Image (cartoon, grey):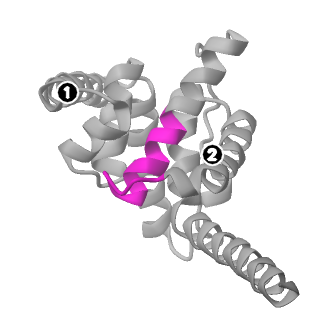
């Protein structure tokens, strides 16, 4: 009987080690994307870091409940969206301000002027995306920055696929207007 108890204990320990290895793998694969998605919702670096940590704690805690109805990536993004939105609702967090320098810890050290210009262009685009209303920002981040299919984005946001398509189209139109306006300001010397 004691041998059985030892096997169960070892099996339980092995299960915990497997869960830890799996969560470590997920963190390596998705930390930057979870952070970016959380940031796109709350627009606060420190808060996005806290949310990212909480997301992976929730993933660890609820890993056994994952039913493979969607991909792990989609499941993690759904947890990120829900955790971010919950925090905003609970804390009454203001989305009005966000820093001009975004994701400093994800910037690469530039080895040439071209790299600096590319990074600056990407950051400006990301800033424009982050200035969109949340419902458009979310779908654009998930679809274009996180490479989710429309069905996966719909699943992550718990929306109908047609709603995601509509929001993508409207978000792209708003983004195009913002880009044209910004380019017009640059050409006019503003």
Q: Nearer the viewer, residue 20 or 55?
A: 20
Task: Give left or right: position of 106 versus 4.
Answer: left
Image point 59% across, 47% down: which residue? 35
Q: The N terminus appears in which quarter of the rendering?
A: bottom right
| Marker disc for residue 84 | none
Question: Residue 117 at what x, y percent from top left?
Answer: 44, 58
Residue assigned mark 2: 55
Image point 27% across, 46% down: which residue? 152
Residue 93 in view in this figure: no
Residue 119 in view in this figure: yes
Instruction: Please tell me how crowded label 1 is: few (under 14), some (14-19), or many (20+) other residues with Cα within 10 Å.
Output: few
Question: Residue 79 at what x, y percent from top left?
Answer: 52, 40
Q: Main secondary structure of the magenta part?
A: helix
SS at circle 2: helix
**Which quarter of the figure has residue 64?**
bottom right
**Which quarter of the figure has residue 50?**
top right
Q: The C terminus appears in which quarter of the rendering?
A: top left
Q: Is residue 104 above or below residue 91?
A: below
Give how far apart the Cα atoms at labels 1 and 2 are: 24 Å
Q: Nearer the viewer, residue 20 or 78?
A: 20
Question: Residue 77 at what x, y percent from top left?
Answer: 45, 45
Question: Residue 123 at what x, y percent from top left?
Answer: 47, 46
Residue assigned mark 1: 160
Image point 68% across, 57% down: which residue? 105
Task: Give left or right: position of 104 versus 77.
Answer: right
Residue found farthest to the front: 1
Task: Give left or right: position of 101 versus 140.
Answer: right
Of callouts 1 and 2, the N-terminal one:
2
Residue range in magenta is 66-81
Task: Give left or right: position of 178 versus 168.
Answer: right
């Amino acid at each position: 009987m004691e041998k059985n108890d030892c096997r169960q204990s070892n099996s339980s320990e092995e299960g915990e080690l497997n869960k830890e290895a799996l969560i470590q793998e997920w963190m390596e694969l998705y930390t930057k994307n979870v952070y970016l998605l959380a940031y796109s919702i709350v627009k606060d670096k420190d808060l996005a870091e806290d949310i990212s940590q909480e997301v992976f704690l929730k993933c660890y805690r609820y890993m056994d409940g994952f039913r493979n109805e969607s991909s792990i990536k989609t499941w993690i993004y759904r947890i990120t969206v829900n955790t971010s939105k919950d925090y905003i609702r609970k804390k009454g967090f203001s989305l009005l301000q966000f820093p001009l320098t975004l994701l400093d810890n994800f910037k690469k050290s530039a080895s040439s002027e071209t790299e600096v210009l590319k990074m600056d262009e990407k950051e400006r685009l990301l800033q424009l995306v982050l200035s969109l209303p949340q419902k458009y920002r979310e779908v654009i981040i998930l679809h274009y920055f996180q490479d989710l299919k429309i069905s996966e984005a719909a699943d992550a946001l718990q929306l109908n696929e047609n709603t995601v398509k509509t929001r993508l189209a409207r978000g792209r139109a708003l983004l195009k207007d913002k880009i044209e306006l910004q380019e017009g300001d640059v050409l006019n010397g503003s």
